[in-house]
Image (cartoon, rainbow, N blue to C red):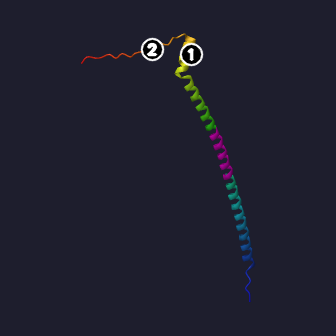
Amino acid sequence: MEAKEPTALVQQRSLLNRWSIFALVFVSAISTVLYVSNVIGVKKLLVESDVLQKRIDSLRTVNESLRTESYRLQSADRITRIAQERLGLIPPPQAPTVLEEKTKR
């Protein structure tokens, strides 16, 4: 003969089984939401990183351009030409001689 389980025990197992399934679905849903949120956050950080990298590259290009312009403006040929044209300065016929003082010991 088969022993039948009491009805109360069957109902208790059924209720426990329902809550277990509900808890599993709830935990799965929360895990999915957290995962998707993390993926969205990482995507935003990657986009921001790309924007900042492009800005850095642009600033490096501008910096190099300004450095080149600075070197051009500081060139001796340009300064000499402007001094002659605008200020009327005349270059010396020969290079200056440096005299050193000899000290007695």
Q: Which residues are magenta?
A: 38-54
Give the camera-side residue of 83 and 11: 83
Q: Quadrant of the N terminus?
A: bottom right
> Is 97 left, or right, of 22 in this rendering?
left
Q: Quadrant of the C terminus?
A: top left
Q: Secondary structure at mark 1?
A: helix
Name the residue located 74 percent from the left edge and 68 percent from the top edge.
18
Q: Which residue is mark 2?
A: 94
Q: Secondary structure at mark 2?
A: loop
Q: Amino acid at mark 2?
A: Gln
Q: Name the chief secondary structure element in magenta.
A: helix
Give the camera-side residue of 35 and 27: 35
Task: Please tell me in which quadrant of the rendered image residue 74 appears.
Answer: top right
**N-terminal-most mark, 1 or 2:** 1
In front of the other: label 1 or label 2?
A: 2
Q: Amino acid at mark 1?
A: Ile
Residue 67 belongs to the span the image colors magenta: no
- In the rendered image, residue 2, in percent from the top left (x then y), is placed at 74, 87
Badge 2 density bin: few <14, some 14–19, many ≥20, Cα 10 Å: few
Above or below — where is 102 with respect to 9?
above
Q: Which residue is mark 1?
A: 82
- In the rendered image, residue 25, in percent from the top left (x then y), is placed at 72, 63
Name the residue located 73 percent from the left edge and 80 percent from the top edge.
6
Badge 1 density bin: few <14, some 14–19, many ≥20, Cα 10 Å: few
Name the residue located 56 percent from the left edge and 15 percent from the top edge.
82
Residue 44 belongs to the span the image colors magenta: yes
